[in-house]
């Protein structure tokens, strides 16, 4: 067989992408990432139609999403699974505005933020020690302002079954100093994360030093990582809760001038 005949035979055996069924192209796209899907649909007509297929975007929507949607403060309207996916990537307020839920666009994993109202703050309802109010730069309608305490203890928890499986997470306290903070100087604050099986991660942070290092997010808020973990079920399957804490109960000097916006439980990204 001469070379031209061989080339013709190979050409006949080649499959043109445009000739593939849309369901097949959708399956091909399902092995990529959401970013790849958007890029391919923007440059190729072959991928554009398949890139809007509901079955494709269903792959990137965790089943827990459908349990969370009824809890949204503002009902989430969507005409396609693709639209729903991007809406969740923007985050939604849930549970009467005390929590935020989102999908991380780079990993498609679930993330949450618990407001200060969702935390257990020692003497939090005593107006001599804590003030509950609002700020324009807060993510929630209400946040906690520390007026004066010697014993600082802020605790919270989340059910590990609400998180994405086989995913490394980090617990992040979102804090901010007011105009006149005091008592924080060289006093280390203990942050900890406790797994259902009792495994403990802990660290000590000097908040004033963190502020000077300017490790902040927009608006002057500090993000303090309390610990990192991968959700696992407890050995007896009785307790699924990841518990976290911020405390200073040893020096017990007078402290004040700190705002607590909440705690993020977010998928760790590189």
Image (spheres, rainbow, N blue to C red):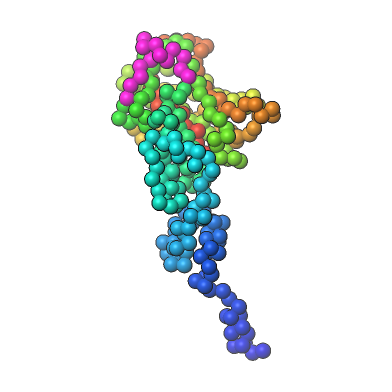
Give the image location of residue 251, x and y in percent. 49, 11
Question: Relative to 76, is 228 above or below?
Answer: above
Question: Relative to 215, is 4 above or below?
Answer: below
Q: Residue at x 57, y 28 (%)?
A: 242
Kindly give the residue lying farthest to the bottom in the view shown.
2
**Position of the N terminus by quadrant:** bottom right
Give the image location of residue 134, x and y in percent. 32, 25
- Inspect this view and state whether residue 223 appears: no
Tally of marks: 0
Residue range (magenta): 120-134
Of residue 1 and residue 202, the one placed in the foreground of this image is 1
Q: Residue at x 49, y 71 (%)?
A: 18
- Inspect this view and state whether residue 147 appears: yes
Question: Relative to 10, is 63 above or below?
Answer: above
Residue 68 sits inside the magenta stretch = no
Give the image location of residue 224, x and y in percent. 47, 29
């Amino acid at each position: 067989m001469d070379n031209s005949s061989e080339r013709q035979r190979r050409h006949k055996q080649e499959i043109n992408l445009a000739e593939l069924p849309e369901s097949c192209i959708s399956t091909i796209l399902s092995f990529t990432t959401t970013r790849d899907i958007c890029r391919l649909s923007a440059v190729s007509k072959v991928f554009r139609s398949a890139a809007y297929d509901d079955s494709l975007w269903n792959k990137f929507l965790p089943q827990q999403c459908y349990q969370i949607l009824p809890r949204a403060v503002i009902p989430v309207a969507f005409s396609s699974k693709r639209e729903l996916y991007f809406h969740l990537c923007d985050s939604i307020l849930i549970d009467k505005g005390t929590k935020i839920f989102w999908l991380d666009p780079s990993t498609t994993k679930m993330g949450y933020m618990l407001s200060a109202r969702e935390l257990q703050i020692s003497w939090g309802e005593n107006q001599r020690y804590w003030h509950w109010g609002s700020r324009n730069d807060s993510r929630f309608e209400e946040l906690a302002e520390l007026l004066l305490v010697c014993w600082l203890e802020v605790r919270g928890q989340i059910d590990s079954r609400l998180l994405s499986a086989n995913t490394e997470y980090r617990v992040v306290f979102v804090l901010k100093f007011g105009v006149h903070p005091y008592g924080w100087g060289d006093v280390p604050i203990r942050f900890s994360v406790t797994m259902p099986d009792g495994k403990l991660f802990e660290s000590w942070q000097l908040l004033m030093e963190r502020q000077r290092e300017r490790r902040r997010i927009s608006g002057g808020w500090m993000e303090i990582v309390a610990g990192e973990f991968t959700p696992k079920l407890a050995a007896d399957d009785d307790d699924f809760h990841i518990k976290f804490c911020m405390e200073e109960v040893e020096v017990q000097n007078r402290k004040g001038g700190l705002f607590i916006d909440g705690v993020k439980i977010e998928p760790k990204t590189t």
